[in-house]
Amino acid sequence: MRMAGLLLASLVMVAIVSAAQARPSAPSTAAADVRELGASVATVHPDPFRAVTRARFEAEVDALAQRAPSLSRNEVLVGVLRIIALLGPRNGHTGLFPADSHTRPLSLYPLRLYEFSDGLYVVDAVDRTLVRSRLVAVQGVPIEQVLAQVRLLTPGDNESNIRGLAPHFLLTAEVLDGLGITDGAESAQFTLERTGGVRSDVTLSAIPAARYGTRFADPMFGHYPSALPAAAKPLYLSGAKHPLWARTLAGGKVVYVGFNSVRRPTQSVLAKIERLARKPGVRRVIVDVRLNGGGDNTTYGPLTSLFRSPKVNRPGRLYLLVGRATFSAAGNFSAEIDRDTRAVIVGEPTGGGVETYGDTFPVHLPTLGWTVRVAARYHERKNGRDDQRLAVAPDVPVALTSAQYFAGRDPVLARALRGL
């Protein structure tokens, strides 16, 4: 975070503490927690009423606070998630995230899901026999209906961001119970379709979020639900543990750069990328940020300078591969490459926005036991004042099917390599 960000966070802390001290002390209740959340959003967020009117937001907060004494804790959770989602697009950082550390932890069912172009599939599981199955229903409710309800509770910068995160919220036991899809948050029945169209019902027990995060950990960001898990292939997943790496492809005609975490690059890696890009015979430089969930957006300047250089920034020479997991500082990076270079962008829209609210401040709800992150700072990498895009969209859209993924194929990279 920049010094300005630290100063802002300090000022926000002062504002919240002062506001809390000004209110008369009283025992905390679920209703008081809901009202505290509403007041904190209005205080901390740079522009909370951009997508929703203040009147509607405050009415929704008041309605949930009044109903809270008669609701179960998990029904209040669903209500809180709905209120947060009212903030609308550009708000992928603001949320009550299931895998975060809470004083009253949430729990998840031991699957990892990913929405491909042909459906919602299990890409990892504690029970490995379930991998490659398509999720058809939860507790007998068709998955399309379940996902539609969960999407209304999922925060996001844009549609691509929500598409990446919604399956994770769908696996949260307390969310399913609060929606009334399950009766309780201990177990649920998942209907899975195996290869060949054979369906079966599997009852799973929820596990604590901390255990879930450890079991389904990713190399860069702990558990990152928007990304596919690291694997031996294809190429970009095989290099998931490296923040920044490079190699040549196609007999030396292509320089491939895997950029998986926004942190200060080492001089050795920067020098390697520049040396490879300047080699005679190199016809294409491909920068892959499909696994990049962000980091420190003050550190990628040397990379953007390299990719803007005349040796790289030529028509048909620079390619950027993006997807739903390209978020936060990686979304900023992608927007700058899109704005300042001639890069051809391939894949699906970024999960991170051209404009976004980030640098979150934690708001603890003491009775409910959950912590909500509230964005405290505005970031933008717009291409002019009239740029209202919510994502960096690909010039060449390429979808991924479950069959391609499970076969270890990468149609996005294949498209970027076409014509060599």
Image (cartoon, grey):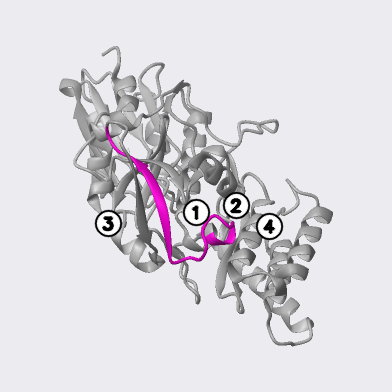
Q: Do the residues labelled 1 and 2 touch (CB within 8 Å)?
A: yes
Q: Which of marks 2 and 4 is nearer the N terminus?
A: 4
Q: In the image, what residue type sits under mark 3? A: Val
Identify whether 306 is placed above or below 316.
below
Q: Position of residue 37 (x, y in %)?
A: 68, 67
Q: Where is residue 110 in the image (x, y as percent from the top left)?
A: 35, 57
Corner quadrant of residue 43: bottom right
Q: Distance between the residues labelled 1 and 2?
A: 8 Å
Which residue appears at 20% of the width and 26% of the height?
249
**Mark 3, mark 2: which one is toward the viewer?**
3
Q: Residue furthest left?
A: 251
Q: How far apart are marks 3 and 4 (CA)?
A: 33 Å
The residue to which callout 3 is attached is: 126
Q: How many discs mark residues in the rendered view?
A: 4
Q: Which of marks 3 and 2 is nearer the N terminus?
A: 3
The residue to which callout 4 is attached is: 83
Q: Which of marks 3 and 4 is nearer the N terminus?
A: 4
Q: In the image, what residue type sits under mark 2? A: Leu
Which residue appears at 29% of the width and 35% of the height?
257
Q: Distance between the residues labelled 3 and 1?
A: 18 Å
User: Badge 4: how crowded within 10 Å, few (<14), some, or many (20+)?
Assistant: many
Q: Are marks 3 and 4 in contact (CB under 8 Å)?
A: no
Q: Do the residues labelled 2 and 4 touch (CB within 8 Å)?
A: no
Please check the rendered image and state whether residue 186 is part of the magenta-colored stretch, yes or no.
yes
Q: Find the magenta span and give its range.
A: 177-195
Q: Residue furthest right?
A: 55
In front of the other: 128 or 398: 128
